[in-house]
Amino acid sequence: MKGLKLHGKDLIAIGYPEGRAIGLAINVMLKHHRKWSEEKALELLCSILADPASYSEHEHYAPIADALTGRDRKNEAQHELVARKDYRTYGADHIEQGAIHQMEVAMKLPVTVGGALMPDAHQGYGLPIGGVLAVENAVIPYGVGMDIGCRMCLSIFRIDPSVLEKNREDHKRLLTEHTRFGRAVHEKRMDHEVLERSEFNTIPVVKHLKSRAWQQIGSSGSGNHFVEFGVVEIADAQNEFELPVGAYLALLSHSGSRGMGAGIAAHYTRVAKELCKLPADAQNLAWLSLDSAEGMEYWLAMNLAGDFASACHHQIHARIAKAIGEKPAAMVENHHNFAWKEMHDGREVIVHRKGATPAGKGVLGVIPGSMTAPGYIVRGTGMAESINSASHGAGRTMSRTRAKETISPSEVKIHLDQHGITLVGGGLDEAPMAYKDIRTVMDSQRDLVEVIGSFTPKVVRMCGDGSAAED
């Protein structure tokens, strides 16, 4: 087989400018692709020329991309970490060391103003799950996370919850018929005004995600996302819903912005890493200045993804409410995996809550447990030390991989039966035993929230093969 032959005139013919880029391109092709055909090599070089940014971090092609864009890596600003700022940890005895290390690194960023670690914390990517980070005039895509705007939504109905025991199969059928998870989508989709937002036309990466958003609207993700019927017990007579103390049928959902949010997160995380160079253990905390075009683009895209996530929940609840023929008497909705502009110590900061619930003074939220443990309807106390935040759930006590390796289907089935839980879908990675004790978590954040009531799951719908409930 003849070896690859390339000449400068070949590259000029496809649009390469005369100069350093041509020599680099020929050298790289000959070094790594000597057995390729000329046609195949020129096709790749055309791709690099058309979109050098996509190749700026490639192991082999980055020098070509740099030459095309005029990037001088030697003179790029390398941000160094600074002295760690103090932060408050809640429930430290139950938080793994990996999460604490990630928080320690985040508190050394030069843009960091304050932070807090919630009692459900566990290790994530960049900022730990359960990490709260306040920074100045910047946004960290990985500090928000891949599932932008992931949230809880609770509908409370003026229906005696005893219907769940009398007609459990009917409620299982309602969830099966009116919810979709993972790759499954509704055959007849409901329209929503969020799909008409101008950001779909003005932000390039969002424009390419609109068709996916339209396809997935009203559906839920995989993993730990769920829709479930359960029993709400209102304990606070002075509740904001003006509901009498007592028990009610309720619907609780947990999901985020689906493929659209993941696409936005992946794109702007890559952009942030290109523009903001950090030491190795802090690379996933690369930020975008809100004074930059990229930072403002991400901010607008993030907010769109959050609104899309909310629309998905509202459609889920609307479908179920219509099916049972009853409008909710009250609804509570709160999100995590997001960044907010808030005041902290007298100045505006950007607060990232990656797996943490907003808990400002009087702010309502839902903090779920596992599928066999209660969740709680809460009212924030506005604690400054927690950056007005609380946990977003019980938090994992073992990884998904470890749960699959150590928990058996029969063990889960016995556990579900003991707690009277009907499960549709679900995998061993979401087994209740993979989560912390929600009561311990709530005890660690007594100063952060006031409990209005509880939610106890009864009929749970999740993505998955159903292995968590198999014989």
Image: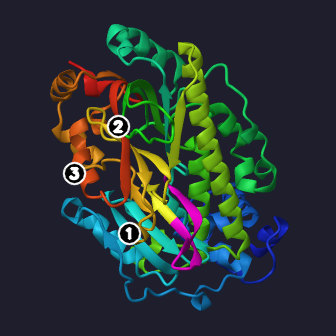
Rendered position, 244 above or below 80? above
Question: Can you give x and y, in whole percent of width and height, for residue 412 in the image?
Answer: 20, 29
**Mark 2 sits on what residue?**
235
N-term mark: 2 or 3: 2
Name the residue: 20% across, 39% down: 433
Badge 3 marks a residue whose secondary structure is: helix
- Which of marks 1 and 2 precedes in the sequence? 1
Task: Write the residue at 81% across / 76% down.
Answer: 17
The disc at residue 116 is: 1
Mark 3 highlights which residue?
440
Where's residue 343, x and y in %?
57, 72
Amino acid type at image mark 2? Ala
Vertical side of 324 occupied by 195: above or below: below
Task: Tell me the chief SS of the magenta region.
Answer: strand
Label 2: few (<14), some or many (≥20) within 10 Å?
A: some
Residue 249's quadrant in the figure? top left
Q: Is residue 418 magenta?
A: no
